């Protein structure tokens, strides 16, 4: 085996270790990849995504969406397929789980944009999956596809993309629940498998029904430990250690069954002993609806929580530091005019190993805003999330915004409509320029692109482009052009029965490009 082959195998192995599930191939002499010194920036050639089970409500209506942007230098062939998890588990009344029958976990009636060949769609996606057909499959980059599922039987999805679809592949599920616990709009971006997650903002209180959804994409079982931290430190749990998630299965865990302690604000730490999983918390409230709580960015001395809606009536910040040291967080709000310090909340004290919660009121006061949290000298790492309420009295709805990762190169938000979509972008440390592309619609429409300048220290709710002649929903792709770092989130909103339904998704970088060293160079130049 020659030196070139050995170098490329080592590079691909290192990449897989960084991203959890990705692969690249050797750069051709004529590749369109960008070169920086000895390294070539190339599209990843294989990646995976996991979508949790959408809902336990019979009234739920779920839309799955899948999309891959057009990427220069990507392979001309490939596939992007999402299938139902082979073994779907459902929670019993006592919070335990029981395996369902293989492939009979629900049906998703496709709308016709993502089916193979004739585009007519299939009536029962769960049965199709049992026969080997996908729930959702892309046909071409640049055009999103959707599928729908009704009721509590909508399945968790496991998927892979390769070739021309792998770079920037994104999937989302959006669920509307008309009534009952957690009623409202619930949205979550499907995520890659990993081995550790932090969820500040969960709860074991009687008013909340919070499920930790674990999805295993692999052919071997995963073993997971769940740690819960409340206002006085770690909570005693009964069955939080050594939870087995079967191969290619989804396992919902009701958090209140793990401990006898009822606490309003809890930080959940998920550690995977063996294998890897996707993880997300579904937080459902009796009075204020519910939404998905995605994992916070890794513990850091500087956090950004982007895109708090301008009409938020209440904002509750939950923070946790994993170490023993206390920290006084400096709190600033990135507003349309710049960074400001919220009156009465200049600094917040967080004790080591204890979950702290702070009511910030109507923080944004009618303007776009993002929270910027800083530990002194960045010396104490912290995780954080905010719970946001819109509406008043008995007509309130809730959503969650965790600390987000920056959009380093590109990020995508799915299931956008001509009305009810807000794209919020913040550049807390320096001026930045971004390019935003509206894709073709799922049923028709021509892509549109606009460029925006974001001033340092500000948050802007930008007037995002909409495809010309739009039919259906579309994708919004944000690309950084200069400056930064840039953080972004997308809000979907509608009004049902006087209740302001909404959901917010931060936009992490899609990690669709990777720096690959020249075969003749040392692999130490491989960068994340």
Image (cartoon, rainbow, N blue to C red):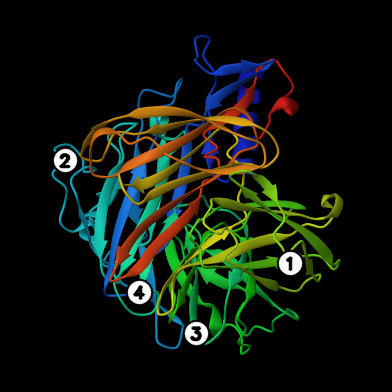
Q: Residue at x 46, y 69 (%)?
A: 251
Residue 201 x/y as whole percent: 60, 69
Q: How far apart, in angstroms, are the residues tagged by discs 4 and 2?
A: 30 Å
Q: How far apart, in angstroms, are the residues tagged by discs 1 and 4?
A: 40 Å
Q: Quadrant of residue 138?
A: top left
Q: How far apart, in angstroms, are the residues tagged by discs 4 and 3?
A: 17 Å
Q: In the depicted view, which residue is nearer to us: 8 or 201? A: 201
Residue that mark 2 sits on: 119
Q: Residue at x 50, y 80 (%)?
A: 208
Residue that mark 4 sits on: 56
Residue that mark 1 sits on: 344
Q: How far apart, in angstroms, are the residues tagged by discs 3 and 2?
A: 44 Å
Residue that mark 3 sits on: 207
How packed is label 1: few (under 14 Cα within 10 Å), some, or many (20 or more)? Answer: few
Residue 117 x/y as whole percent: 17, 36
Q: Is residue 418 left or right of residue 357?
A: left
């Amino acid at each position: 085996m020659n030196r070139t082959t050995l170098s490329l195998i080592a590079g691909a192995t290192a990449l897989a270790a960084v991203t959890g599930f990705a692969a690249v191939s050797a750069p051709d002499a004529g590749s369109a990849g960008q070169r920086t010194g000895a390294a070539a920036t190339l599209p990843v050639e294989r990646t995976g995504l996991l979508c949790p089970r959408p809902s336990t409500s019979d009234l739920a209506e779920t839309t799955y969406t899948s999309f891959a942007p057009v990427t220069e230098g990507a392979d001309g062939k490939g596939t992007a397929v999402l299938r139902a998890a082979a073994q779907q588990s459902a929670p019993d009344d006592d919070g335990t789980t029981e395996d369902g029958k293989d492939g009979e976990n629900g049906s998703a009636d496709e709308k016709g944009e993502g089916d193979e060949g004739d585009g007519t769609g299939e009536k029962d996606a769960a049965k199709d999956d049992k026969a080997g057909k996908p729930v959702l499959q892309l046909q071409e980059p640049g055009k999103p596809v959707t599928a729908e599922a009704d009721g509590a039987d909508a399945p968790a999805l496991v998927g892979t993309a390769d070739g021309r679809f792998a770079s920037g592949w994104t999937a989302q599920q959006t669920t509307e629940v008309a009534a009952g616990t957690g009623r409202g709009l619930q949205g979550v971006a499907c995520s890659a498998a990993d081995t550790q997650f932090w969820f500040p903002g969960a709860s074991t209180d009687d008013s909340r029904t919070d499920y930790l959804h674990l999805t295993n994409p692999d052919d071997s079982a995963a073993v997971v430990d769940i740690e819960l931290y409340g206002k006085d430190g770690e909570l005693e749990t009964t069955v939080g250690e050594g939870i087995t998630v079967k191969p290619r299965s989804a396992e919902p865990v009701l958090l209140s069954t793990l401990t006898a302690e009822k606490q309003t604000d809890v930080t959940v730490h998920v550690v995977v002993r063996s294998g890897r999983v996707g993880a997300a918390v579904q937080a459902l409230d009796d009075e204020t609806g519910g939404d998905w709580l995605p994992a916070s960015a890794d513990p850091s001395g500087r956090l950004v929580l982007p895109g708090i809606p301008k009409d938020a009536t209440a904002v509750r910040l939950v923070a946790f530091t994993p170490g023993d040291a206390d920290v006084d967080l400096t709190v600033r709000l990135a507003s349309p005019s710049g960074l400001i310090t919220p009156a009465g909340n200049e600094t917040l004290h967080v004790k080591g190993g204890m979950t702290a919660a702070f009511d910030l009121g109507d923080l944004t006061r009618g303007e776009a805003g993002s929270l910027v949290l800083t530990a002194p000298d960045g010396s104490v790492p912290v995780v954080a999330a905010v719970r946001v309420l819109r509406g008043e009295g008995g007509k309130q709805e809730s959503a969650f915004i965790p600390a987000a990762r920056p959009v380093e190169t590109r990020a995508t938000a799915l299931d956008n409509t001509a009305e009810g979509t807000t794209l919020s972008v913040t550049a807390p440390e320096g001026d930045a320029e971004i390019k935003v592309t509206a894709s073709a619609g799922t049923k028709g429409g021509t892509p549109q692109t606009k460029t925006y300048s974001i001033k340092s220290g500000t948050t802007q709710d930008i007037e995002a482009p909409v495809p010309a002649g739009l039919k259906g929903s579309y994708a919004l792709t944000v690309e950084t052009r200069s400056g930064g770092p840039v953080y972004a989130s997308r809000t979907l909103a509608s009004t049902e029965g006087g209740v302001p339904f909404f959901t917010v998704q931060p936009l992490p970088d899609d990690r669709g490009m990777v720096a690959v060293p020249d075969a003749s160079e040392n692999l130490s130049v491989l960068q994340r």
